[in-house]
Image: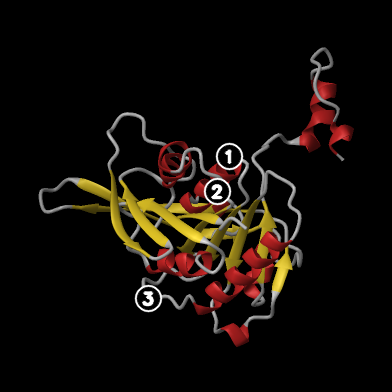
Amino acid sequence: MKERLILVTNDDGYASKGLAAAIEVARTFGRVIAVAPETPQSGMSQAITMYNPLYLRKIREEEGVDVYSFSGTPVDCVKMAFDYLLRGERIDLMISGINHGSNSAVNVLYSGTMGAAIEGSFYGCPAVGLSLDDHGADADFEASVIYGKRIIGELLSGPLELPLCLNVNVPVGRPGELRGLRLCRQNRGFWREEFYRHEDPRGREYFWLTGAFVNEEPDAEDTDEWALRNKYVSVVPVQTDLTDYRQMRNLGRIFPSVGGPDPESRK
């Protein structure tokens, strides 16, 4: 039986503790090729590099694991792996992460971790974005590794319908403190940002961005945010079709002469 080939990437950089944890998960199931950004790339979503040269270098090679750094974004890393480095090879699974910080709710749209996972799914490869709800550089990834192995093992053992992309978020806590897995939907919420103005020693103004997440449905028990708050690992299948099918019928009344897809056909 041919050994599985698993691609690993992230948005925190090739030297991050989270990437090492993701490689630990992946190497349980096959040969691992990791292509990760040279520098941290959080918040890059689906960004690609078009106007600068890109540089690939091998960082290390050991039995069953090759690690590369790439000077582009997380999505650049995925494209480099599929379209150049591993072109012609069958990649059985892609893991993006393990991210330092949750990618629940609307964060999935901003996340470089999830941008990379979504990109991997475009290639017909099952893809999983793994995130830990802890931004600390020295975060404890033990529970994330345990649950990551469980989720990947179950995915690889069953028939899959492609494309498949999962957004998995692990709450902070020791393995014994977590209550298990929850298959969830994405929470509805948004960020309200603030810009803090400062001046540098030359009198030039600059700004730091911060903000707070506004949860529009804090009591809904079927969302990823609820799962994390209640010590469950959230698993959300995501897709790239952003069409608002709920608006189709209403807009059909506003624009009666404009044809469009039947929203009933999506049910």
Give percent across and percent down for residue 236: 68, 57
Viewer-side label of 2, 1:
2
The residue wearing badge 2 is 91
Along the viewing direction, whichever of 218 and 3 lies nearer the viewer: 3
Residue 87 to residue 43: above or below:
above
The residue wearing badge 1 is 123
Give percent across and percent down for residue 141: 48, 75
Q: Amino acid at mark 1?
A: Tyr
Q: Which residue of the protein is positioned furthest toward the left in this rendering?
A: 202
Give percent across and percent down for residue 261: 81, 25
Residue 63 to residue 267: above or below:
below
- Marks 3 and 2, the one that precedes in the sequence: 2
The residue wearing badge 3 is 138
> Which colour scheme appears in the figure?
secondary structure
Does the rendering let one see residue 187? no
Describe residue 29's horizontal placement relative to residue 34 as left or right: right
Helix or strand or loop: what does disc 1 sit on? loop
Q: Amino acid at mark 2?
A: Ile
Q: Quadrant of residue 40?
A: bottom left
Q: Which residue of the protein is positioned furthest toward the front in this rendering?
A: 1
Circles 2 and 1 in contact, beta carbons < 8 Å: yes
Viewer-side label of 3, 2:
2
For the point 49% across and 60% down, which residue is it? 31
- Marks 2 and 1, the one that precedes in the sequence: 2
For the point 54% across and 42% down, which residue is it? 119
Image quadrant holding the C terminus, namely top right
